Amino acid sequence: MKAIDLGSKKVLFTVFKLTLPAMLAQFISVLYSIVDRMYVGNIAVIGKDVLAGVGVCAPVSTLINSFAFLIGLGGAPLFAMSLGEGKQENAKKILSNALTALAVLAVAVAAAAIAFRRPLLMTFGASDRTYIYAERYLTVCAAGAIFPIIATGLNQYIIAQGYAGIGMATTAIGAAANIALDPLFIFVFDMDAQGAAIATVLSQFLSFVFVLTFLRLKNTKIRLVIRKPSAKIVGRIVKLGISPFLIIATDSVIVIVANAMLKKYGGADGDMWITVSTIVQAFFSIVTMPLLGISTGSQPVLSYNYGAKNI
């Protein structure tokens, strides 16, 4: 519950205290993604087809969730700058508008993904054999997209207040719940891809509840209070967030194109190559994702001190 002093003169120590939990959070996120695929791949008889279907959905789900970073990484620096300037009321307005923007985006993106799921999935690498599993997985994840988008987006504002441990806990709660729920829905309830998706959405819901609860606590430095939406504030958030959004979104597009090419040129083994690619991408994330903790963890220190004119 204790926030780190972002204006501390011990800069290296402060950055380390923020980046270490952020890196661990990213590692935990990757780990439960890998465990999720392990469970799916071990489904009797149809495991490889289900994994191929989930592999087609994975970059689409990441693309959907990238909208969380449009608002999260766009508004959190402005939020921390306001704290550095001593303008807490302005910080509250930014946080409130961030919630509104995240909710609107989540509903719009989820509706589009569900409405166009068949042409999307067939274009992005699903085959007649794997589409049924991809469709089940994507439909559930898209329907519950509001939970990860709001949880991930608002978690940036928790970290921006110096609550590095709470930010990590948000990810850890979702990861632990998903690892526990996966075998229940996949094997006990025999729900294959749909079960994996339900387990994922339920775990994301727990992270969502945790984030909103923490931001509403009386002891939280900047509490979440619903205010009238401001197009000007949302515009500033989007303007700053478009860069990280495009970086994450294009990473997803690269994987989508790779899956589509594997399907097109992989011949009879196209589904198998997508399965292989899904496994490789999951393990490759072990290297790349934790490194994001360095940038996301140090950003609040940079923003706060910029706002405080402590160049």
Image (tube, rainbow, N blue to C red):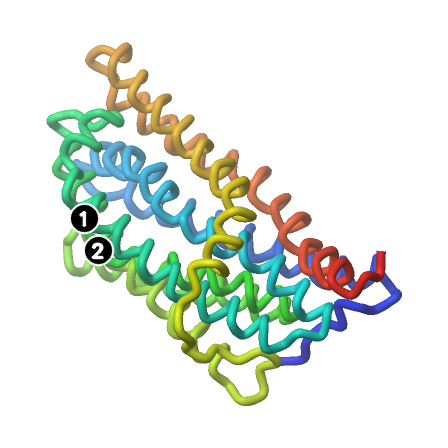
Identify the residue at image location x=58%, y=38%: 288
1 and 2 marks in contact (CB < 8 Å): yes
Going by the numbered disc 2, the residue's amino acid type is Ala
Identify the residue at image location x=11%, y=26%: 128
Examine the rendering and report whether any part of residue 228 can be seen.
Answer: yes
Going by the numbered disc 1, the residue's amino acid type is Thr
Identify the residue at image location x=28%, y=33%: 56
Where does residue 11 sit, x and y in percent of width and height?
Answer: 84, 60
Q: Which mark is residue 139?
A: 1
Give the vertical position of 243 relative to 196 (above or below).
above
Label 2 element class: helix
Q: In the figure, is residue 80 to the left or right of 143?
A: right
Location of residue 8 (image quadrant) = bottom right
- Tell me the residue that label 2 is attached to: 143
Q: Quadrant of the N terminus?
A: bottom right
Residue farthest toward the right in the current orientation of the protein:
9
Label 1 element class: helix
- Inter-mark Cα distance, 1 to 2: 6 Å
Q: Which mark is residue 58?
A: none
Where does residue 246 sit, x and y in percent of width and height?
Answer: 48, 37
